[in-house]
Amino acid sequence: MGLNDRDYMAENDRKNSNPVKCPKTGYWVGVENCSKCSYIGCSVRPPVNPTNESARYKVWSESKPVFWDHESWNKKLDATGSKPKPQPTQSKTEPQEPKATNEKTFKSKKTTENNSLPKWLLALLLIFTLSFIGLVINTLVGSIIPFWILFGFSVIFSIEKWFSYYTKKNRWLGRLYRLALNLGILSLLGLVTWSGIKLFSHQFVQSALIGSILFVAEFAFFIWVWRVVSKNSWRWPSMKLTVFTLICLFLVFAFAGVQPMSLYKDTALNKIQAAFSTENNNQPVTTYSNNPTTTSLNTTASVATTTHTNVLITTPSQTIATVQSIITGINSKTGVYKNYYLGLVNSSEGVIGGDGCYDDSGNFIVLINNKKATDPTYVQLVSFLQNDKTDQYPYIYTNPVFASYYPPAESHVNLTRIQGIIDGTIQPQNPDICADFAERLHNEAEKTGIRCAYVSIDLSGYPDPSHLGIPSNSGHALDAFQTTDRGLVYVDATGWIATVPHPSRSVATVNLVVGQQYIPVSLFPESGWQSSSISMGIVTNMEIFWDGMWNN
């Protein structure tokens, strides 16, 4: 049996004089039988230039490979008498020292990698920079939308660029990220829809060009976020599950009384009820009976709230009974008509007049009071004001006219027109001045069953910012509501001047105190507009009229 490679090397090692341990193979060898591997730093023989060395064959031993030249290979064949099965020949490329230019390039790249900023610091710098730019744009255009667009872009871009690995490695972190993306794109969809409606109705921001640029930026950001959501569509939860969950939570919170969901629910139900009430009012009320019975019928009296008038009808067999209301008209002495009674605003300076919004004859402010009206909660008040359209009419200033009349003032009121307004056959004229707005808001509130007061005040130092010619010391009118949970709330529903850019709603609340500034605060603030108005002056006097007076 022939010797293997290990035995052959060990046998020759014993025959050599002055054996030296090879630093590469670990065997004791001499100069005569050295494998001439050209190992750098070898203590057996000096290194050989691998480029001038003849080709060598590689035979694998049990532990480490040994390289042979032609002469050593032939000696092994003669000693063993057999040719071992060679392994596939492989050329060994000796390590070469890199060139000077490559070495410099390598060192420069390594230095660049060591000096690069960490990912978390890059993300913070990006978020801070874009957020600061957004705040600067917000200051210039008067809208917070640019800040949120740039802030949201920086956060999502940082996660996708530098931290996507962590969202993939951690399952729950990835789920939270997908949920945030779903909520973000739904909110962005609502923002784009709202901005489009405001832009095309010329109520977005003061400048149409800036509003158009903001809308385009919102739409572009929406498309980019949608691509990011599509890229992460494999994550849980899905968009369908998110939308379904939000709807369920909204319904639970709305019917549990949580604000503002409960307010939105009440508003939607009121609109649905108003729609059905309008359809029912357009049809005659009839009953069919086969037997003589006594039937109670309920007829709707208003749109926002339902008032019932019980009419007892005795119908014979196989007959049709038609219910008709017998109207006798407004009592000129008491001002009472059905469930309503009238009142005039008799202030310390006399009976206050308007611009003929309700009374087109004497132009007096006529308060239509509801006997069944009650004090609302604050939520009910906000819901009513949100649906009311009194503040949608433009403010038109007219010079005050002081006219004389023969008392009593009640004799000059057009009761026929007031009766038609109560019955709904006649609509009041559009309000022009503040007294008309306060009059209309009062009557609309009483019609819906909400108790309201007419408030007259005197102002000193009115700045007249629109240069309408309003004197510095002038009067103003607003309304008051005694809420059951927040006390007395003052509401100013005077409309905007049509020629001046303005938001869609002008209804505001006021902290009304004699001796302090009169500053209306928007009840429904809008993006791009300040919620607080400028001071209209100092309140020097105020009078509150809950029902007014009629022949008293």
Image (cartoon, grey):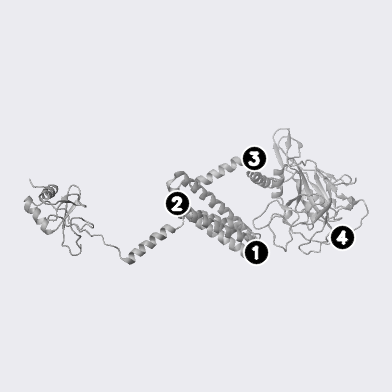
How far apart, in angstroms, are the residues tagged by discs 3 and 2?
40 Å
Residue pointed to by mark 2:
164
Residue pointed to by mark 3:
257
Q: Which one is earlier in the sequence, the residue at label 4 or at label 2?
A: 2
Label 2 neighbour load within 10 Å: few <14, some 14-19, many 20+: some
Residue pointed to by mark 4:
401
Q: What residue type is labelled 2?
A: Ser
Q: Which one is earlier in the sequence, the residue at label 4 or at label 1?
A: 1
How far apart, in angstroms, are the residues tagged by discs 1 and 2?
40 Å
User: Is 188 displayed left or right of 422 in the figure?
Assistant: left
Camera-near label (4 vs 1) is 1
Q: What residue type is labelled 1?
A: Ser
Locate residue 202: give its quadrant: bottom right
Q: Which amino acid does label 4 sit on?
A: Val
Residue pointed to by mark 1:
207
User: Is 263 displayed left or right of 447 in the figure?
Assistant: left
Whether pointer 4 and pointer 2 mark residues with C-beta atoms closer than 8 Å, the reply is: no
Q: Mark 1: which secondary structure?
A: loop
- Across the whole image, how many numbered discs are drawn on residues? 4
